[in-house]
Image (cartoon, rainbow, N blue to C red):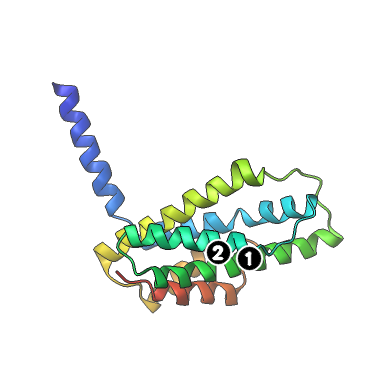
Amino acid sequence: MRSIFFACLLSIFSLQTKAEVTSIELFRTINERLSYMEDVALFKVKNHLPIEDIQRENDVIDKAKVFASEQGFDSGIVKDFFRAQISVAKAIQYRYRADLLSQPSFRQPRDLQKEVRPALIRLGNQIIEQMAAYCKNHGEFQKTQFTEFNEAIIVKYVTETDKQLLFRALLKVKQ
């Protein structure tokens, strides 16, 4: 009986903890998702694939819109954020790919289908869940949070302009 009580308590606290998302946690999840882009680029280079894949981008956005609607968001707002995120992801891939011309990499990328895409899907959903939890508890994102966002996004090939694009899209996210 005691173990059932503690299991119930643990599940209540874990749900409460999940709902108490800070902006920095969300920003770090965005950074983590972007951190996979070098592997994506390297995989594409080694397999002679183009960086831009419009059909794949549309699939990602369509799935994000559905999941966002389930979380109580206007799908158009989340669509804009994911478009910005995809633009930054492609910029990272192009920049890294350009560096590979003069500094080839001999490491093997993580497998795109088996490892990277599942992680990107998981992180994309986590971003939406964290946005929803944050908006529920704190309301809208504020311009004053850019410094915190700027410090959290540390992926090598992300520029200040990229960060501003992402942050402007994040400012539009409301429930």
In the rendered image, the vertical position of residue 113 relative to residue 71, given as above or below:
above
Residue 67 in which image quadrant: bottom left
The C terminus sits in image quarter: bottom left
Q: Assign a secondary structure to mark 2.
A: helix
Q: What's the distance in space between the residues labelled 2 and 1, CA to CA?
A: 6 Å
Q: Residue at (80%, 58%) from the top-left corner?
A: 100
Residue 64 in which image quadrant: bottom left
Label drawn at residue 58: 2
Report the side of 170 relative to 85 (left or right): left
Q: Residue at (54%, 52%) from the top-left corner?
A: 120
Going by the numbered disc 1, the residue's amino acid type is Ile
Label drawn at residue 81: none
Residue 33 image point, x, y percent: 54, 55
Q: In front: 67, or 123?
A: 67
Report the side of 94 relative to 132 (left or right): right
For label 2, the crowd category at 10 Å Cα-Cα, with few meaning under 14, some 14 to 19 and many 20 or more, is few
Q: Are marks 2 and 1 in contact (CB under 8 Å)?
A: yes
The N terminus sits in image quarter: top left
In the rendered image, the vertical position of residue 81 relative to residue 16, given as above or below:
below
Report the side of 95 relative to 12 (left or right): right
Residue 21 image point, x, y percent: 33, 56
Q: In front: 78, or 155?
A: 78
Q: Residue at (37%, 71%) from the top-left corner?
A: 173
Going by the numbered disc 2, the residue's amino acid type is Asn
Q: Residue at (67%, 43%) from the top-left corner?
A: 110
Residue 59 image point, x, y percent: 54, 59
The residue that mark 1 highlights is 54
Residue 129 in which image quadrant: bottom left
